[in-house]
Image (cartoon, grey):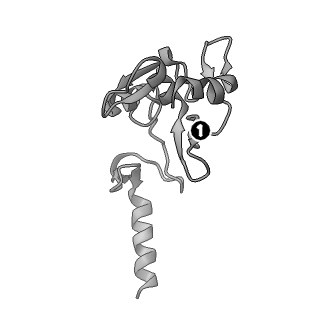
Amino acid sequence: MNIDEWNERIQPRLVVDPETGCWRWPGWNNGLGYGKIQVGGRKGRGLYVHRIAYELFVGPIPEGMDLDHLCRVRDCARPDHLEPVTRSENIRRGAGAGGVLAPPYVMPETCRAGHALVGDNLGPPGTDGSHWRCRTCDREDARRRYDTHR
């Protein structure tokens, strides 16, 4: 995409946020909030608006790098709000499970069935590492499976 296409297709649709200065994209997004446009007709491909803006106004994005939204606004396309970083750094800075902006993990006091998650009743996380296990529930589940298959 060149600057003429930018001026015709993207720039008129951008909404400048008066508080943050972000260039917000109100159009189509990828489902996670990152603005996209379709190029090449109906069977073309989608391009990220913020990546187009960065490459037009700053230069090429270094190979293997992501663009981090320093403003934390995913639909922002303002080039000085973007910084090329490694994928791991982008994740570290983000609000996902491994990011510094993620809410702190709080260990629940009970399992879904209401058993206390303390002492011998607290088992290690499942194989996916997503949660701590209740040993009482594990025993009850094993008993139900055993009784079903006898």
Position in image of residue 146 (x %, y %): 40, 80
The quadrant of the rendering that contains the C terminus is: bottom left
Which amino acid, by three-letter code, is at mark 1?
Ile
Q: Does residue 2 lie above or below 20 as drawn? A: below
The local secondary structure at tag 1 comes to strand
Res 105 seen here: yes
| In the foreground, 147 or 93 | 93
Q: Residue at x 63, y 23 (%)?
A: 11
Q: Residue at x 69, y 26 (%)?
A: 13
| In the foreground, 58 or 145 | 58
Q: Does residue 123 lie above or below 34 as drawn? A: below
Quadrant position of residue 40: top right
Please give the residue where the numbered disc 1 appears in the rendered image.
37
Position in image of residue 12 (x %, y %): 69, 23
| In the foreground, 82 or 118 | 82
Q: Is residue 63 left or right of residue 149?
A: left
